[in-house]
Amino acid sequence: MKVLGISAGRKMNNTEILVKEALMGAEEAGAEVELIRLHDLKNISLKPNPLQHELPARLEKYKKYLTYSKPAH
């Protein structure tokens, strides 16, 4: 199994720390892991995607493979 962690915030912010923790757990369970920091990528466009309204329909076929978490309050 391969697990990809994506962090869109600054280096070592809370989100990145949590993503790294999740990746470490996945790695301990035998997964191949990789972390991508969007901040480190060059020439990336973060403009809204005109097809973003289609995303839920496109993800539906992958629903059984996705894991969602709710923010802790």
Image (cartoon, rainbow, N blue to C red):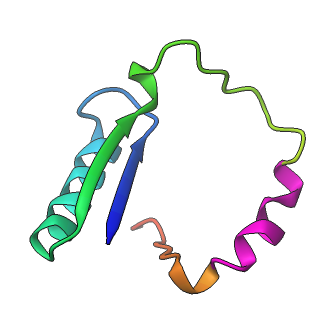
Outermost residue toward the bottom in this view: 64
Outermost residue toward the top in this view: 43
> Residue at the location (15% across, 60% down)?
24
Q: Dominant secondary structure of the magenta stretch?
A: helix
> Residue at the location (34% across, 62% down)?
3
> Residue at the location (67% across, 27% down)?
46
Quadrant assignment, res 43:
top right
Task: Tell whether 14 sits left or right of 65.
Answer: left
Looking at this view, is 46 or 15 the one in front? 46
Q: Is residue 43 magenta?
A: no
x, y percentage for residue 51? 88, 47
x, y percentage for residue 70? 48, 71
> Residue at the location (30% across, 43% down)?
16
Asked if residue 32 is positioned above or below residue 30 in the image, the reply reads above
Task: Tell whether 61 sits left or right of 57.
Answer: left
Asked if residue 64 is positioned above or below residue 35 in the image, the reply reads below
x, y percentage for residue 56? 78, 67
Q: Quadrant of the N terminus?
A: bottom left
Asked if residue 45 is positioned above or below residue 38 in the image, the reply reads above
Task: Tell whether 25 sits left or right of 48.
Answer: left
Quadrant assignment, res 2:
bottom left
x, y percentage for residue 28? 10, 70
Residue stretch rendered in magenta on the structure? 52-62
